[in-house]
Amino acid sequence: MSRQFSSAARALITFLWDGTSKDTAWETAARQCIENNTKLPTIEVAKVKGEPHKSKDPKEHVSMVLYDNNDVRVTSVHVYKDGTGKFSKGKFN
């Protein structure tokens, strides 16, 4: 599979907003984070959990859970506004 096709396939991510209202700036950042990570399988659904916040992680972020095309949980991620992220499973960082 070519990188170009892979990026196109990842562009079809469905975002589900759980506990917050839709924010396209965070969707854009999440798409960038996911598309730039060549270690991830194809992600079809990103469930956004709550409002943007800071916690033990001092940078403001949105927490998301990522699912593959079989609706299997792949990992969770803190997505930052600059399009980077920190994944819960180290193999994706």
Image (cartoon, grey):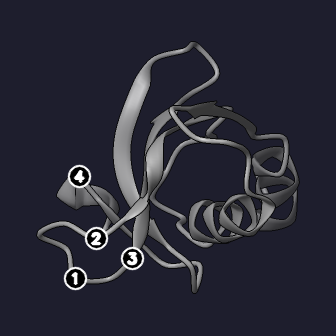
Q: Is residue 27 left or right of residue 66?
A: right
Per the rendering, the mark at residue 69 is none
Q: Earlier in the sequence, mark 2 or mark 3?
A: 2
Residue 9 in the image: above or below residue 60: above
Q: Nearer the observer, disc 3 or disc 4?
A: 3
Q: Which residue is mark 4?
A: 88
For label 4, count other residues whose C-alpha is less than 10 Å away and answer few (under 14), some (14-19) or many (20+).
some
Q: CA distance from mark 1 to mark 2?
A: 5 Å
Residue 53 position by quadrant: bottom left
For label 1, count other residues whose C-alpha is less than 10 Å away and answer few (under 14), some (14-19) or many (20+).
few
Q: Earlier in the sequence, mark 4 or mark 2?
A: 2
**Percent x, y of residue 57:** 19, 74
Q: CA distance from mark 3 to mark 1?
A: 7 Å
The answer to whether marks 1 and 2 mark residues whose Cβ atoms lie closer than 8 Å is yes
Per the rendering, the mark at residue 58 is 1
Pick whichever, 73 or 57, lies toward us.
57
Q: Indicate the secondary structure of the residue bearing disc 4.
A: loop
Q: Which residue is mark 3?
A: 60
**Percent x, y of residue 59:** 32, 83
Q: CA distance from mark 1 to mark 4?
A: 16 Å
Q: Nearer the observer, disc 4 or disc 2?
A: 2
Residue drawn at x 39%, y 76% as measured from the top left: 60
The answer to whether marks 2 and 3 mark residues whose Cβ atoms lie closer than 8 Å is yes
Q: Is residue 35 left or right of residue 79?
A: right
Residue 31 position by quadrant: bottom right
Q: Earlier in the sequence, mark 1 or mark 4?
A: 1
Q: Which residue is mark 2?
A: 54
